[in-house]
Amino acid sequence: MHISSQFLTREQMREYDRKAIEEKGIPGMLLMENAGRSCAEKCVELAGGNADFSVAVFAGGGNNGGDGFVAARHLHLKGAEVCVVLTADESKISGDAAENLKIIKKMGLQIIHTLDSENLRSIIAARDIIIDALLGTGFSGSLREPVRSIISLINESGKKVLAVDIPSGMDCNTADVEDIAVKAEATVTFAARKKGFAADNAAEYTGRITVAGIGG
């Protein structure tokens, strides 16, 4: 299904994923693999085309975080210095995201669980690029801690930021930002632009948008 020129709602994206997995028989792990690899490739591009850089992947506990785990693995294999800041309790991560977390742990990637502001500020300051894999298209409403504070620190840093699918804190359907959202230099969005990206304020948060096919 070629839909890259369309603007899709979160409900339409859920249906896209469902059809890919249930009707086409494409494993969710493959969709996540393609998504994360696309983000890793864009990250290298942001770094100037080589992998001699450091990156912190801020990952939540859902599939957006799973995409971030895949991106972290690919960047590690390319030779980048990678750490993953995990904002969710590992025991609550499930499905394909949990499998990809297991993989990067077995590979020895640095996983950081300490989320106090001074530690996070130093982590961000030491990295060339930040990947936002905190929240995906399912988010709406108000941000909760610690994610809100993390987004504030990321925005204050002035670092290059790559958003995975959508900047965390932005509503997929409307681009509404109730409080704060990640301000990215670039966003890799999957399958199609999201409906909210057509809003006047969206570019302030998304930066340059790349649409990546993920196999569905």
Image: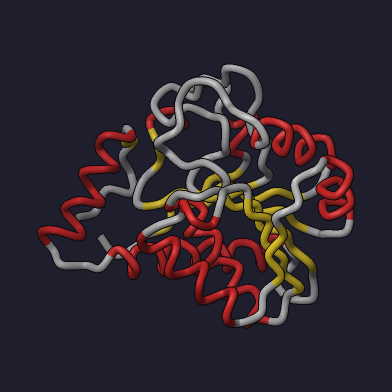
Where is residue 141? Give x, y as percent: 48, 21
Where is residue 80? Give x, y as percent: 73, 75
Q: Quadrant of the C terminus?
A: bottom left
Vertical comparison of 44 with 155: above or below: below
Where is residue 131? Give x, y as percent: 65, 54
Residue at horizontal 31 percent and vertical 36 percent from the top = 8
Q: In which quarter of the image is residue 32?
A: bottom left
Q: 4 or 116, which lies in front?
A: 116
Q: In this view, does 83 lie to the left or right of 124?
A: left
Vertical comparison of 78 with 33: above or below: below
Residue at horizontal 76 percent and vertical 73 percent from the top = 81
Image color mode? secondary structure
Where is residue 212? Give x, y as percent: 42, 57
Residue that protrudes farthest toward the left in the picture: 23
Q: 59 or 194, which lies in front?
A: 59
Q: Quadrant of the N terminus?
A: bottom left
